[in-house]
Image: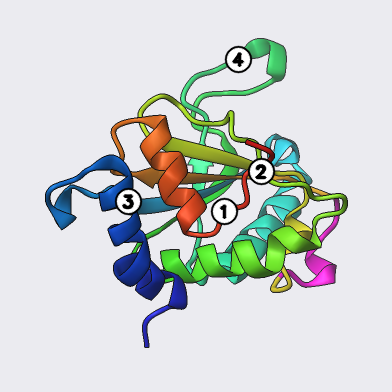
């Protein structure tokens, strides 16, 4: 069974974006390519941080439905006490059906649970159609069990689209249901 967001994209969003931006071909319409969930665990560099990293990995696995990959430091930074190759966090890359299911859960379940939520920032585009949403509490997802939360941690959700401009990417994400703050 296909997710509702994917069907909505194929039946409604493509037509709206074709009219809005004047695309001549359905394949020229921007689409969601992948979503990357990334969580840095600052305590992972300490000896007792393995448990914190394990808990965040369990939480990401429950949120995404996939096993996360650990992320390593690319270079040493003495002031932060980081060595090259040291484990610093975990990430998951979602594509296809799981990606659309995640968008549906994020928009309809997780974001409404954020206290004093007024919409997501429209300023977090990178200039090439990629949008990054910062979430301050990973506990807003109902899949995360209370015993996995040893400390309130944040995570980044990066939406990678095939859009060429931020305006096209914003229109795509807005039509998919992402609630942008006051335009």
Q: Give the range drawn in magenta.
A: 144-151
Closer to the eye: label 1 or 3: 3
Does residue 69 show up? no
Which numbered marker is on residue 120? 2
Q: Which of marks 3 and 4 is nearer the N terminus?
A: 3
Taking 22 as reference, is 4 above or below it?
Answer: below
On the image, the x and y values in percent for residue 32 come to 35, 53
Residue at 63% of width from left, 23% of height from top? Answer: 82
x, y percentage for residue 149? 82, 60
- Along the line of sight, the residue nearer the viewer: 86 or 28: 28
**Residue drawn at point x = 37 percent, y = 82 percent:** 2
- On whether residue 52 falls in the magenta region, the answer is no
Q: What label does residue 178 carry, if any? A: 1
Horizontally, is 151 left or right of 135 in the view?
right
* Local secondary structure at mark 1: loop
* Crowding near the residue tagged with mark 1, few <14, some 14–19, many ≥20 C-alpha atoms within 10 Å: some
Q: Which of marks 1 and 4 is nearer the N terminus?
A: 4
Query: Earlier along the polypeptide chain: callout 2 or callout 1?
Result: 2
Q: Name the residue under label 3.
A: 17
- Location of the N terminus by quadrant is bottom left
Disc 4 element: loop
């Amino acid at each position: 069974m296909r997710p509702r967001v994917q069907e909505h994209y194929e039946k409604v969003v493509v037509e709206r974006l074709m009219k809005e931006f004047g695309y001549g071909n359905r394949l020229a319409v921007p689409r969601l390519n992948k979503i990357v969930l990334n969580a840095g665990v600052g305590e992972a560099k300490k000896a007792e941080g393995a448990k914190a990293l394990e808990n965040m990995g369990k939480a990401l696995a429950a949120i995404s439905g996939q096993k996360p990959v650990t992320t390593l430091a690319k270079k040493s930074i003495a002031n932060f006490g980081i060595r090259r190759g040291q484990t610093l966090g975990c990430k998951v890359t979602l594509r296809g059906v799981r990606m659309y299911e995640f968008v549906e859960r994020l928009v309809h379940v997780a974001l409404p649970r954020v206290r004093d939520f007024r919409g997501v920032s429209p300023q977090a585009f990178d200039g090439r159609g990629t949008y990054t949403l910062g979430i301050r509490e990973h506990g807003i997802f109902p899949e995360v069990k209370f015993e996995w939360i040893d400390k309130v941690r944040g995570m980044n959700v990066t939406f990678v689209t095939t859009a060429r401009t931020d305006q096209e990417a914003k229109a795509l994400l807005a039509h998919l249901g992402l609630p942008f703050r006051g335009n």
